[in-house]
Amino acid sequence: MRWPWHVVRLPVLFLLVVLEPVVAFLCGGLALAGVLAVVFFELIGAPHFPMWTMLAISMSFVCALVLYEGAVGLFSA
């Protein structure tokens, strides 16, 4: 059973490692931009701004990055 796992694991790991800088930059950047937008719009007191929705979306980018790092760890073990 180890041989088929290695046949699947190595190409997937290669793809995940190659895409890791792009995914980290995008997810981290979008999470930071979302939090900064929430802070900005709350400071200026924008009416009807969905603060909690924006924060949830920003945190989901952080969770996606953590899951991606977990997938890299799973396939590299």
Image (cartoon, rainbow, N blue to C red):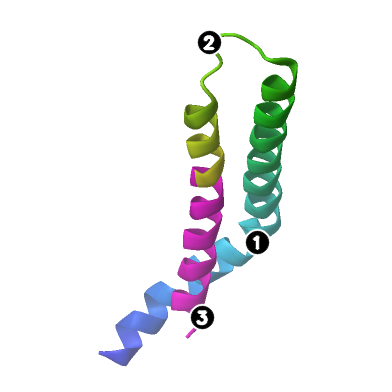
Residue at 68%, 50% (x, y): give it.
22
Q: Position of residue 65 (x, y in %)?
A: 55, 55
Count of marks placed on residues? 3
Q: Which residues are magenta?
A: 60-77
| Chief secondary structure of the magenta portion | helix
Would you identify the image quadrant in which residue 24 lies? bottom right
Residue on which disc 2 sits: 48
> Under tag 1, what secondary structure?
helix
Residue on which disc 3 sits: 76
Judged left or right of residue 23, residue 12 is left
Q: Position of residue 44 (x, y in %)?
A: 74, 16
Measured Cα–Cα span from mark 3 to mark 1: 13 Å
Would you identify the image quadrant in which residue 9 lies? bottom left
> Under tag 3, what secondary structure?
helix
Mark 2 belongs to which amino acid?
Answer: His
Would you identify the image quadrant in which residue 29 lies? top right
Front position in the image: 69 or 45:
45
Residue 18 marker: 1
Mark 1 belongs to which amino acid?
Answer: Val
Q: Position of residue 63 (x, y in %)?
A: 49, 53
Residue at 54%, 29% (x, y): give it.
54
Task: Tell me which label, 3 or 2, sits earlier in the chain.
Answer: 2
Tell me, yes or no, whether the highlighted magenta stretch contains residue 65: yes
